[in-house]
Amino acid sequence: MAQAAAMAHIADLAEYVATSPSSYHAAASAAKRLDAAGFTALDEAEAWALGAGSYYVVRDGAVIAWVQPEGATATSGFRILGAHTDSPGFKLKPKPTTGSNGWWQAGVEVYGGPLLNSWLDRELVLAGRLVLRDGSVHLAQTEPLLRIPQLAIHLDRQVNDGLTLDRQAHTNPIFGAGDLADADILAVLAASAGVDPSQIAGYDVLTAPAQRGEVFGEGKNFFASSRLDNLSSVHAGLVALTDYARKPEGHRIAMLAAFDHEELGSESRSGASGPFLEELLQRIQASFGATVEDTARALANSVCLSADAGHAVHPNYAERHDPANRPQVNAGPLLKINANQRYATDAVGAAAFAGWCDTAGVPYQEFVSNNRVPCGSTIGPLTATRIGIRTVDVGVALLSMHSAREMCGVDDPWYLSKVARVFFGE
């Protein structure tokens, strides 16, 4: 049976995921938690008067928060936990109300790299932001609205020999039935946000599973939920940073940087390849009156913990994993290593992570890919390249990554948060 503290952490993670069906909601939900913890919201368009304290900035679907202790100086350096707020799924297209044969359907585009079959026969919500003609931005989230129905086996007797989904023809979800002239999916979204549908001038709206996260398995040791990649890391960082903010010590600036669009390659104004983090670091340094020399020293004193989900060994596909490194759930966060710098961990970073885990009293395990199965990448190499600070790639071990419903061990997100707390305040 999982420890009580781990169960409490998982219950809070389930609540955070439930309030974060899109990256925009994830940033807004994080902002609410930061407000409750006494952080000050800053507007990027305004002048900042920074000093010792706790602050955050929201840019679209990304959020960066930091704690600046009394002892911080221009050369102190930063402890940055990097994560991302987006997950694979489907995004609403322009002219989104479609349909045929008496069914109302939503026109959607595949976002990132979802496991398409996992989205079939599952109730979905639409969630994201609506921008009105006056420029105001409103978050929208429907009740369970959509479903991508699978073709019955009676109409495809070979389906169990291999399911192939056409991304255009087979993934448009249904949301109603009747005369298509009466259908308007934007009106449903507008009603959920309490706005006039005729005033919608733009939108960024995605699908999300309606089902909440659930603890299950013998001894209640497993947790299944949507968006564990990567809200498990965002939430762990939030918990650790708000706890550290109660009594900051030392001189380093502790920071959570939760970016958007990682699943698309991070190349956006709110992604890790964009300028968000760099601009913010420059503004913090400017508040100290830092010179170029000061800033170079501060970055040399900085570390980024790139926290993104990784793979637990799959019992039915064990041959897809490295034969010597076989991560398990509830055995601690992963230290992710790749010879081709798909992860940014090096020997110095690995030793540092081992020390933080020892201090936190948390086990950890190494992850490396099978040579025949190339791994994905994270914000780690992007941040190391763009900012030039030492970066260590870590994360919670999952099964079914990029499924509409992923799973992890109950203990592991709590372990990650404990390590993050040590990382911030060591």
Image (tube, rainbow, N blue to C red):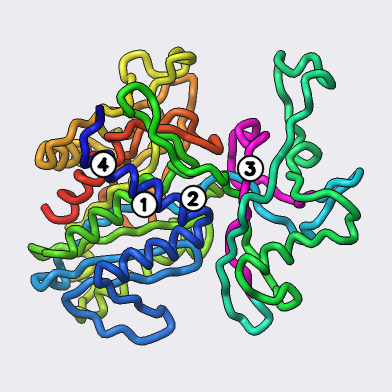
Residue kind at label 3, given as amino acid type? Glu
- Mark toward the viewer: 3 or 4: 3
Q: Which mark is residue 414?
A: 4
Q: Secondary structure at mark 4?
A: helix
Q: Which residue is mark 2?
A: 262
Mark positioned earlier in the residue sequence (1 or 2): 1
Range of magenta residues: 105-131
Q: Which residue is mark 3?
A: 123
Residue kind at label 2, given as amino acid type? Glu
Task: State yes or no: residue 114 in magenta.
Answer: yes
The residue at the point 76 percent across, 51 percent down is 107
Place of residue 256 in the rendered image (x, y in percent of width and height, measured from the top left): 31, 58
Is residue 338 visible from the viewing direction of this image? Answer: no
Mark positioned earlier in the residue sequence (3 or 1): 3
**3D distance between C-alphas at marks 2 and 4:** 23 Å
Place of residue 337 in the rendered image (x, y in percent of width and height, measured from the top left): 32, 32
Place of residue 204 in the rendered image (x, y in percent of width and height, measured from the top left): 62, 62
Residue kind at label 4, given as amino acid type? Trp
Is residue 413 visible from the viewing direction of this image? Answer: yes
Mark positioned earlier in the residue sequence (2 or 4): 2
- Say above or below: 406 vs 54: above
- Mark toward the viewer: 3 or 1: 3
> Is 371 left or right of 160, judged from the image as shown?
left
Nearer the observer, 210 or 359? 210
Mark positioned earlier in the residue sequence (3 or 4): 3
**3D distance between C-alphas at marks 3 and 1:** 25 Å
Mark 1: few, some, or many residues within 10 Å (few <14, many ≥20)? many
Q: Which residue is mark 1?
A: 234
Q: Secondary structure at mark 2?
A: helix
- Say above or below: 70 vs 335: below
